[in-house]
């Protein structure tokens, strides 16, 4: 018997290795034939469990943790096909499972999945200790009753689970479903359940065996990814909208401001030209002063448009002087007092971070002016090794945290993206009537100049 088991073990290992690579129907058929061969050679279920456990130790358990759930799932399908020809009675199967619970559980799932074994005719059911642990219970706490699990299924998923189960039993469709359950503590968890029934000669299901895996972390990751993609889609659309608005604003300024000034300058120049042609005396000094004033206005308009596109002061004087100038203009325009706590010599900001730092402060002040109704703002830019802390706090109307994604959510999203590019994060604190506080926590390693030439 040892020789037969050794030969079967080698064939099983080779077949499972191939199936883990391609998960083909041919691989499942091969496993089924191995099961028939084992029965003909009078090998038992415990021998199959030992054979499968050895294969898991060789092929699955050494794999990276991120790959193990997928490999376990495929290995379980392969093992189920091996077991199918045995056609054990429910009582004999339970006796084998009870005799080697720990060993069989490891063989099927690497101690990650929870096993269940159900008799649809008598409604008797068995839950393995790992099944109960996934549900948050000790082995002795959860009764072996179908309702003990079905009653914990989230009501939004219950009908879908029962329909999938009935489709498997009545029409032999695949039972493979993901659903939410309530654990002992009341915490909702996601599980992935698969099962396979056995039918008698009359076509009636007399046993169904399966497993559940806790997939809560994967579901949370998927939801976070979906939310992130949706957020990025909305941000991309907003950026495109802002670009079009900026183009329209610049076009208006060029047309309404520069265009009118250039037209007036052209008219004044034409008058001078007419005077020269008619041999009139050279224009009075007041006329020339008017021309000079028009030219000065043109220069100032061009500087204003250029400063909006990119603050030249950032390159000429550095980040802190540019922020000081931004605050002065902000206070003059909106009548909001800004109290500054900035040590200009505490951090040697490099050139790469300046525009992101400037835009974060600019956007925060813009949100204060547009949405807060504040009369005073406190701006801190301080060194707190190993971080730079930028904090903007207003005394405005505030907002509920859940409502922080309101009208200015795109501004906050943009600040979060800039902070992330610098390796940091944005934190928000606010309550209705208690003002709004925004804090950027940024690593000094990404902000400080690498050498003197970078400052």
Image (cartoon, helix red, strand yellow):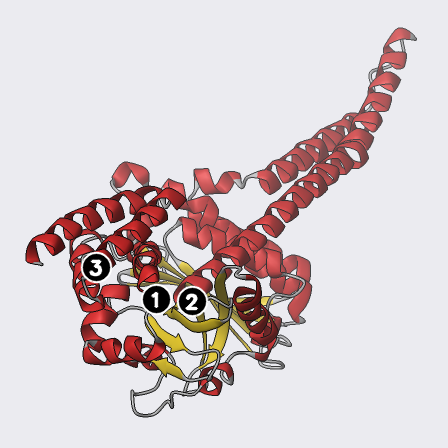
Q: Name the secondary structure under disc 3.
A: helix
Identify which residue is drawn at 48% across, 52% down.
417
Label annotation for residue 52:
3
Identify which residue is drawn at 45% across, 87% down.
148
- Left or right, 225 with respect to 107, comes to right
> Quadrant location of residue 198?
bottom left
> If the image is split into quadrants, where does the N terminus sit?
bottom left
> Quadrant location of residue 197?
bottom left
Q: Name the secondary structure under disc 1.
A: loop
Identify which residue is drawn at 18% across, 57% down.
41
Q: Residue furthest left?
A: 2
Real-space CA distance between mark 3 and mark 2, rounded to the nearest whole angstrom: 21 Å
Q: Decide which of tag 3 and tag 2 comes sooner along the chain.
A: 3
Mark 2, residue position:
198
Mark 1, residue position:
87
Can you give x and y, in whole percent of width and height, for residue 230 in the image?
Answer: 58, 54
- Left or right, 406 with respect to 143, comes to right
Q: Nearer the viewer, residue 395 or 168?
A: 168
Q: Name the secondary structure under disc 2.
A: strand
The answer to the question of whether label 1 and label 2 lie on touching residues, with beta carbons closer than 8 A, is: yes
- Left or right, 10 with respect to 244, comes to left
């Amino acid at each position: 018997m040892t020789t037969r088991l050794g030969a079967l073990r080698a064939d099983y290992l080779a077949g499972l290795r191939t199936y883990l690579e391609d998960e083909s129907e041919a691989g499942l058929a091969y496993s089924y034939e191995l099961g028939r061969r084992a029965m003909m050679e009078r090998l038992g279920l415990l021998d199959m469990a030992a054979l499968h456990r050895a294969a898991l130790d060789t092929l699955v358990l050494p794999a990276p943790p991120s790959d193990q759930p997928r490999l376990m799932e495929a290995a379980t399908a392969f093992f189920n096909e091996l077991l199918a020809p045995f056609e054990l009675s429910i009582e004999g199967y339970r006796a084998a499972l009870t005799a080697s619970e720990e060993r069989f559980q490891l063989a099927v799932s690497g101690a990650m999945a929870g096993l269940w074994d159900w008799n649809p005719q008598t409604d008797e059911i068995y839950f393995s200790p790992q099944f109960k642990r996934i549900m948050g219970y000790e082995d002795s706490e959860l009764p072996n009753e179908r309702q003990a699990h079905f009653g914990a299924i989230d009501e939004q998923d219950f009908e879908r689970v029962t329909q999938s189960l009935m489709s498997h039993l009545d029409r032999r469709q695949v039972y493979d479903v993901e659903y939410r359950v309530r654990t002992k503590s009341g915490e909702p968890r996601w599980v992935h359940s698969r099962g396979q029934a056995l039918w008698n000669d009359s076509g009636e299901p007399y046993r169904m065996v399966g497993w559940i895996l806790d997939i809560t972390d994967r579901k949370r990751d998927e939801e976070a990814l979906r939310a992130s993609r949706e957020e990025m889609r909305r941000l991309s659309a907003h950026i495109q909208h802002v670009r079009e608005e900026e183009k329209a604003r610049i076009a208006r300024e060029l047309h309404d401001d520069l265009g009118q000034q250039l037209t007036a300058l052209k008219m004044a120049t034409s008058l001078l030209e007419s005077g020269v042609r008619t041999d009139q005396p050279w224009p009075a000094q007041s006329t020339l002063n008017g021309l000079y004033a028009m030219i000065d206005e043109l220069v100032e308009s061009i500087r204003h448009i250029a400063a909006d596109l990119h603050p030249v002061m950032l390159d000429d004087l550095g980040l802190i002087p540019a922020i000081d100038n931004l605050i002065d203009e902000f206070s003059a325009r909106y009548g909001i007092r800004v109290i500054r706590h900035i040590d200009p010599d505490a951090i040697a900001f490099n050139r790469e971070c300046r525009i992101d730092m400037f835009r974060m402060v600019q956007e925060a002040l813009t949100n204060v002016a547009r949405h807060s109704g504040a009369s005073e703002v406190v701006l801190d830019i301080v060194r707190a090794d190993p971080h730079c802390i930028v904090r903007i706090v207003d005394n405005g109307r505030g907002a509920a945290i859940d409502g922080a994604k309101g009208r200015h959510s795109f501004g906050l999203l943009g600040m979060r993206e800039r902070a992330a590019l610098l390796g940091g994060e944005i934190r928000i604190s606010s309550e209705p009537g208690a003002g709004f506080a925004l804090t950027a926590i940024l690593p000094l390693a990404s902000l400080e100049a690498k050498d003197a030439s970078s400052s």
